[in-house]
Amino acid sequence: MKIKPEIMFRNALFMMCAVLFVGLLTSCSHSDEPEPINSTKKAKRTVVVYAIASNNLWSDFRSDRAEMLRGLENTNLDASRLLVYWVSPTHGLYEGDKDPATGNPYPPALYEVKRDKATGDLGFVTLKTYSRSVYSTDPKRMSDVIADAIAVAPAEHYGLVLWSHGLGWLPASHRSRSSDSNTRGGNILYSFGYDEELNGIDEMDIDELAAAIPNNVFDYIWFDACYMTGIETVYQLRHKCETLVGYPTEIWSGGMPYDIVIETLMSENPDLIAAANKVFDHYALAGWPATASVISMAGLEQLADAVKNIYEQGITLTSNEVEQMQYYSRNTKYPFYDLGQYALKLAEKLPEEYSAALKVALDKSVIYKAITPLSFDRRPFNQEVYSGLSTHIWRGDNSEAEKFYSTLDWYKRVY
């Protein structure tokens, strides 16, 4: 999840952004004929933002759209193209979010930021609309949108931003799709996305997310969502990008400050470490809890080897030792512990070579990490043990969540 806006400092700016957005949405070309969903013109980079905003984060997404436009004012939109798919809620909308002809919410759609040739103003132009009969958390919808984005905006390089609620590896609690009605968890949990429609609610598990994203297309994936740099999520997506950026903790509901980082993300060779540091500083310098991690997928197999070698030795921690571990979630039933701290604690009871190999592998995998001294619930964070990756400590308790955990690639790789 993301921390709600009523307790977020950026929310005070929302009303000013909303006034701006009424004007911006008049240029969204909802009534225009969509452009053909194919193209032969190749850009240097295309960035796709996939935003499941049909939930209580809608006002934050409206603010983020305004930030995107501000951040792209000086960008060459022929060399770099920004495509944004979003789905809005079915209720509680502003007038500008509704089709004036019907009074209904606009359908989910893929948009592109375009510059008006006459005025030079930026706005979102509709490329393709989609039916609400398919959830935006359905892997088929996500894969279709990605395929459409690549077809209409071919590029030498691609980046993907995943925007919504998130809760790491934990399985979805609602299985509303007719194609998959299996309930795998009993709590309000979701891995990525929370799509609330008139006919129900649906979420996406990380194995579904991995299935929806093509291999070796995106050079980076950035999660603008909470809890998504757990090792289970990262490893499940190891073939989907070269670099993954996100947070092992929550992030404030305003998420990424797009106006100060979107131009970097749109560049041909983006400095993802600098961008992640900007997001971290945006909150940390204002005195707000924050974390950030940049993960190189090239180091993951070496990390998996090092962790597996430690786990295979059969070392266990006492309940008191586990209670002393640093954790990153407020879900007390399934807390996300620090991967590096946990594995190193196990390795203390083994020859030095085990911890040495782990430290080398962590340094190769986690190429940037940052954490504030205090957590989101005001607990102290130990910055020295922060590895940038969280993990679940396997219990083998036969719960539905652990049964699901045992199906994930990370579990199969190291246990």
Image (spheres, rainbow, N blue to C red):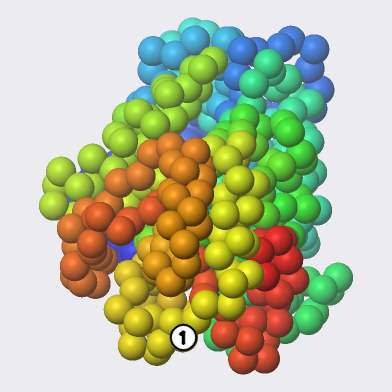
Read off the residue under disc 1: 333
Image position of 195 with respect to 36: above or below: below
For image coordinates 39% across by 31% down, the residue present is 273
* Three-letter amino acid code at the position of disc 1: Lys
Q: Secondary structure at mark 1?
A: loop
State the image quarter where residue 199 is shown.
bottom right
For image coordinates 66% across by 64% down, the residue present is 414
State the image quarter where residue 216 is shown.
top right
Image position of 120 with respect to 373: above or below: above
Q: How many marks?
A: 1
Question: Are there few (<14), some (14-19), or many (20+) residues within 10 Å of tag 1?
Answer: few
For image coordinates 59% across by 72% down, the residue present is 313
Q: Position of residue 297 (x, y in %)?
A: 60, 40
**Left or right: 230, with 400 as reference point:** left
Q: Nearer the viewer, residue 259 or 345?
A: 345
Q: Nearer the viewer, residue 346 or 368?
A: 346
Quarter of the picture containing the C terminus is bottom right
Q: Position of residue 292 (x, y in %)?
A: 36, 47
Residue 202 in sight in this render:
no
Quarter of the picture containing the N terminus is bottom left
For image coordinates 73% across by 20% down, the residue present is 154
Q: Nearer the viewer, residue 360 or 365?
A: 360
**Left or right: 15, with 128 as reference point:** left
Image position of 66 with respect to 117: above or below: below
Residue 361 in sight in this render:
yes
**Left or right: 63, with 45 as reference point:** left
**Left or right: 7, with 386 as reference point:** left
Farthest-out residue, front:
351
Q: Position of residue 261 (x, y in %)?
A: 37, 30
Q: Position of residue 196 (x, y in %)?
A: 59, 68
